[in-house]
Amino acid sequence: MVYQGNKEIVEKGRVDWTTVIFFLLFVMLGWLNIYAASYDLENATGLFDLSGRAGMQLVWIGTSLLLAFALLKIDVGFYEIYAFVFYLAGIGLLLVTLLVAQEINGSRSWLIIGPVRLQPAEFMKFIIALAMAKVFNSYGFRLMERKNLLLVSAIILLPVMLVIAQSETGTALVYLSFILVLYREGLPGGFLFVGIASIVYFILGIKFSDTQVGMLSRGEFITTILIVIFAAGLVWSYMKRRGVVTVLLLLAATTFLTAFIVSLFSVRTDWGLVAIIAFLVTGLYLLYLFFRYRKKTYIFIFLFMVSSFAFLESVEYVFYDVLQPHQQMRIKVTLGMEQDLSGAGYHVGQSKIAIGSGGLVGKGFLNGTQTKLKYVPEQDTDFIFCTIGEEHGFIGSTLILILFMAFVFRLLHLAERQTTVFGRVYGYAAVSVFLFHMIINVGMVIGIMPVIGIPLPFFSYGGSSLWGFTILLFIFLRIDKSRKRI
Amino acid sequence: MSNYNSLTKRRYIIAAVAVIIALVYVVQLFHLQILSPQYREYADSNAFLRRSLYPARGAIYDRKGNLLVYNRPTYDVMMVVREMKQFDTLDFCRTLNINKESFHSLDADMRDRRRNPGYSSYTPQLFMPQLDVKGYGLLQEKLYKFPGIYIQSRTERQYNFPNMGLILGYVAEVDKNKMAADPYYVRGDYVGKSGIELSHEEDLRGEKGVEVLLRDAHGRVQGRYEEGRHDKAPVSGRDLTLGIDIALQAYGEQLMHNKVGSIVMIEPKTGEILCMVSAPTYDPSLLTGNTFSANYQSLENNPYKPLINRAIAGTYPPGSTFKPTQGLIFLQEGIITPESRYSCYGGYPPLGGRPACHGHASPLAIQYALSTSCNSFFCYGFNGMLSNRTKYATVGEAFDVWKNHLVNLGFGYPLGVDLPSEKRGFIPNSKFYSNVFKTERWNAHNIISIAIGQGEILATPLQIANLGATIANRGYFYTPHVVKERKGVSLEETYTTRHESGINREYFEITVNGMADAVTQGTCRGINLAPLVEVCGKTGTAENPHGDDHSLFMGFAPKDDPQIAIAVVVENGRFGATNAVPIARLMMQQFFRGEIPESDQWLEKSIINREILPYAYTRTTLPTE
């Protein structure tokens, strides 16, 4: 395999200062906003007062800087050699945590050692990244071999299950974001399509499960039609046969047209049944095509349709019988099915008020009433973006979003310029984590995503998360520093 | 190789998806922050507690500077449940002078959301209202022992005298209608509900201030917004000085004890009301504090209706006190001259001796007719005016001229006294009778009784007293008013404007002489206070279809440079001379001497002990069982 990637010549052994400056900028802005978010009107503490949140965060920032410096000094081979050792240690720590941790805020994820409280799950992010990088880097590794796929899945899913057992669902979702790495390393787009399709089915199925269209719920009706359209799309994408696509869509349309004409003669029409008939007709047509042309793709598309429908039918069961009531509530509120301003919707409601009241330029540093008066819960940790929105307005919050995107793009750029698979995979893992955190956290605060308690990297208050992100970032910078130049 | 390239291209897909999501977020931010101004309002209504600062309500003084109404602080015991820690409940109960049972019931009441819908364990809640100064002192000393307990001061109306409840009025919590009509008021404000408290509400209330406080998510106050830069200090209410003399008022109320009726005294030179007694009345302190509801209920259920100010809302046929107006109108219209004489044969001859009259010399002229209160004279005059077709084209025209004179004399419409719910009385116009008789061809004889203040004519005691003032002034009056001075501003112009009656002064002189003769040799000799003061007066006996006649008196004194005009109405008091005249006499003694001379003390005693409670009231309001 001949490398044909990045040909730029970088002076040997220099740390990527652009990323370091982003890092420093974020922790400084985070520190100021934590001060604003935790500012108590009655007994205000100083920015540097260790009894306040901002003062403590300064301690975390200081130790993170030391940590960063140390990480850059360690030989790059160390990370690769000990990747599996870290992984086993990490899994062990998660297990220990699960066994000994006390319950704090409904989760058993905190390890208390003397005065220090640590959340091992935060450190598991870079550990998984290292393990994946090492696996991908092994000689002759091909992701799509079943053995490898299983190994990689196991590396990701084992910690996922452990943190779910600790009731840290948000962190589990962060680990799942490593699917982005797999995508970059050759996982077929179809897998992502199946993932996205499942999410769409789930949202439609739940959101419109309240009204009926004949024998189907409105959600099932819409989704059934969507499955037919998806099938036509798949035929187009994999077979490039325009005629087949046309026939397939015509069959479905004819079914509906016939039903419409019948309904004109005042026969009561069950439109749900009509949708199912259209679904069956297209399915049978795909089967016919399979037997006629002996192309496996048709049978796969047929199976996609069948499993889609099965998935759709099981969504309601999963939603109402597997998910916890508070999780159901969060999803319902996010989907706009419930207006629960005092319960699950309270956080998001107050957070939207805080951001919305900021206007164009915001109320000014320390002038945010929503955050000062504790209307927004968790305002210095998961909801820190509220303070930015309220005090610095549209300009401030958009600026932070742009900076964050620029930071992620910089990491993407660094990942792509790696000369080793190890470096690239690790880089993509870092990109996945930061991107996912930003999308979920900001999306939650502005009311687009359900409430999933994960921090905004470098901004949210907390030692474990800041250390975790610092380690993740600076190991990558260390790897990047010593990449082979061309 | 191509596979490798296609994989490196996947970074663009990843970047594109990230950019799309970021764009969606920016759109959402734009929607929340730029397109939705309501979020700013939500945030402000979350955070800002605009607390009203209540000004002290104005005090009220009588004409001699006696303080009548003022504010007294009372103290409410407030509790913040969240801040409470274990404390010595027994000591707390002892300090508040309550027992343990009432402590628990007060506590339960406070927490009961049905009784106290605004209950929150984070904010101060009313635990026990109306602690007195002594209890306040005790609690204040021990407050450090009771975390979560606070004292909140309020003010309450206090009265130095148990008199004139109807004039002073009362204050109570503002109702929905008032709040809808005037945005100044919010729930829980206190507002004047009757009497001066109502009519001078805007003087007395002052101007509320506001302090803008910051309130946290639990409803706790976290300090002032921007160090109080947006606060506004309250402006205290204006003090009022009344024309009323509290001594005279109290004496009048004493005289009217166990009677139904009214005494009104006016200073003719200014229109200031010196006393306005309506009987029965009530002690204004009854309608304060936590006994308000119970007392109000019992006053409202009282069949004698002590909540009606009869001086302005009671309407009576004025009877013979009305006759001076007739003389004045006939003279002014040239129907009679001061020398015109009419014959009276114990009744009005054209109608066969109806209305009847009493023994006196005949024929007689106006001055003598007034002093003897001859019915026939005024019937002749009235008929003479209404049937005069040379001066007036129709009887209707003549009648409306007659009516307009009465309106100019203050009858038929509310005078405009500065008290609420004044009645207008009743002076009919020609249309009224045309409707009644269903023809325009009626004449004076159809309605002759109105010439002597009976029939359809109705007047309030205030209007009758105002007639006394107009005659005393020889032709003009000032609108009667109870408030004489408003601190810091001048009196409204309507109370300082002279209202002319439009009748010549010389005719008033004749009327004055007639009324002076009535006191010295006529119908109301009982009020002759010579040589102390020369009184002019006119008695009245108003026929009452529901029971005994009402006893009336209207007069003024002294004859030259009059200082007071008075009207007395005693319901079912029969002849004017029987009750109204002696009451008026005693009021004048009190006014001119400041005390009741030895010679009149038997009369005072007799009047005070007299009980004239009309059966009619109790009969009509008895529950039908």
Image (cartoon, coloured by chain):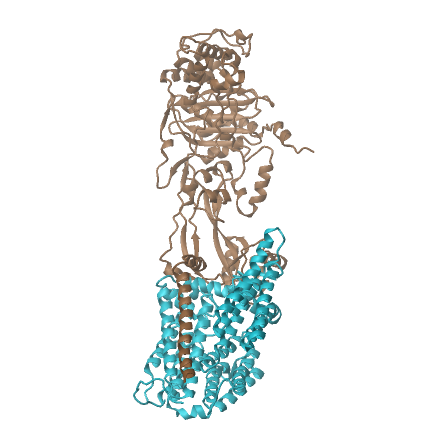
Chain colours: A cyan, B brown
Q: Out of B433 and A90, give the one closest to the viewer.
A: A90
Looking at the image, residue A121 lies above or below residue A13:
above
* Count of numbered labels shown in the rendering: 0
Q: Out of B42 and B112, give the one closest to the viewer.
A: B42
Which residue in the rendered view is the most extreme toward the right? B625
| Residue B310 percent coordinates (x, y) | 52, 30
| Residue A204 percent coordinates (x, y) | 54, 65
Point 58% across, 24% down: residue: B572
Q: Out of B434 and B157, give the one closest to the viewer.
A: B434
Q: Quadrant of the C terminus of chain A?
A: bottom left
Q: Out of B386 and A400, give the one closest to the viewer.
A: A400
Confirm whether residue A115 shows in the render.
no
Which residue in the rendered view is the most extreme toward the front? A292
In this rendering, position of residue B119 left or right of residue B484: right
The quarter of the displayed image where residue A313 is located: bottom right
Point 42% across, 30% down: residue: B480
| Residue A213 percent coordinates (x, y) | 59, 59
Looking at the image, residue B294 lies above or below residue B518:
below
Q: Quadrant of the N terminus of chain A?
A: bottom left
| Residue A383 percent coordinates (x, y) | 45, 70
Looking at the image, residue B268 lies above or below residue A145:
above
Point 51% across, 75% down: residue: A170
Confirm whether residue A329 shows in the render.
yes
